[in-house]
Image: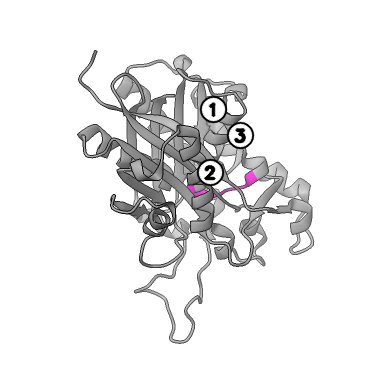
Amino acid sequence: MSDRIYSRIAGTGSYLPEKVLTNDDLAKLVDTSDEWIASRTGIRQRHVAAEGETTGDLAWHAAVRALEAAGVAASELDLIVLGTTTPDLVFPSTACLLQHRLGANGCPAFDVNAACSGFVYALSVADKFIRSGSAKTALVVGAETLTRMVDWSERTSCVLFGDGAGAVVLKADAETGILSTHLHADGGKKELLWNPVGVSVGFKPGEPNAGVRINMTGNEVFKHAVKALDAIVEETLQANGIERSRIDWLIPHQANLRIIEATAKRLEMPMERVIVTVDMHGNTSSGSVPLALDAAVRSGKVQRGQLLLLEAFGGGFTWGSALLRY
């Protein structure tokens, strides 16, 4: 038996708001159609948070389900890391609010903002805590209410995004779990996909939410995403000395079906071994990978002992991957 400590996924959970916005619904708001959206993105519908429903609310539902699946009480948690780019408040962090709501007071809790890569970043951070022995049980969440940042008059971007949350409970394990994580960023490309407003930049007196919108140069983002994900797939395989054929499931960030298909092609992996939820969820940013993982686990597709490759690309730019034995 190795002395190495792994972070094993003990349970998964997810949550989607009740309201569903279909492509046909969007066609009533902007000049678009179901065929136009689906042919370019693979998206058919997305979920939208109700008035008063926050990122923290979505995260709480997903977290409760993950804890139940893992058979873990909130009081047992040693760490909470939450990936989001749409926090409830500037501070305290949404993770702190979630910690109190769960009744897990005392353990460290903090947010990670890496846009659509947020969950993979958060997973990597939690894995390091467990590997070092600083934590034995951790809750990792990806949650977003991105529709609050959408310009509903901009037809090329408003069709892409949805709200949702996913969560996993990690437990220290001597035999199996996360094999490696790989993270990268390039802030030099920020204006290709960004929100130009922050606390210290862009606000005008008396207009606290002015300009809080997603700005994206879609074709450039696509090219950079495909290139970056190609590279990180190769990096992950080489770091673990494995062949592409050994991966049982690819669980990618659900941004665009074309990007997902390009990554699968790089892996020489048939789409039957790729988890796709973008058609039903749209792009839920940091929520997308754990949402897809939970859907795959609960449907019975992903089984214990299988090798999973998780990957994501987001604004920043940020990108990352995680290879794990489920």
Relative horizontal placement of residue 118, taking residue 54 as reference (left or right): left
List the residue tagged with mark 3.
276
| Up-down relation of residue 110 to residue 235 (above or below) | below
| Disc 2 packing (10 Å; few <14; some 14–19; many ≥20) | many
Instruction: Give how far apart the Cα atoms at labels 3 and 2 are.
Output: 10 Å
Q: Is 281 placed left or right of 131 in the picture?
A: right
Q: As drawn, is 318 to the left or to the right of 275?
A: left
**CA–CA distance in space, label 2 to label 1:** 17 Å
Label 1, on which residue? Answer: 264
State the residue in front, 60 or 313: 60
Give x and y (percent) for residue 81: 36, 48
Closest to the observer, 112 or 24? 112
Element type at marker 2?
Answer: helix
Residue type for callout 1: Ala
Residue 236 against residue 204 in the figure, above or below = above
The residue singled out by tag 2 in the image is 288
Q: Are marks 1 and 3 in contact (CB under 8 Å)?
A: no
| Colour option used | one colour
Instruction: Tell me the kind of residue under disc 3.
Output: Val
Q: Is residue 148 above or below residue 6?
A: below
Residue 27, position as x, y percentages in the image: 77, 58
Q: Quadrant of residue 227?
A: top left
Question: Which residue is most to the bottom?
Answer: 206
Question: Which stretch is magenta?
Answer: 281-286
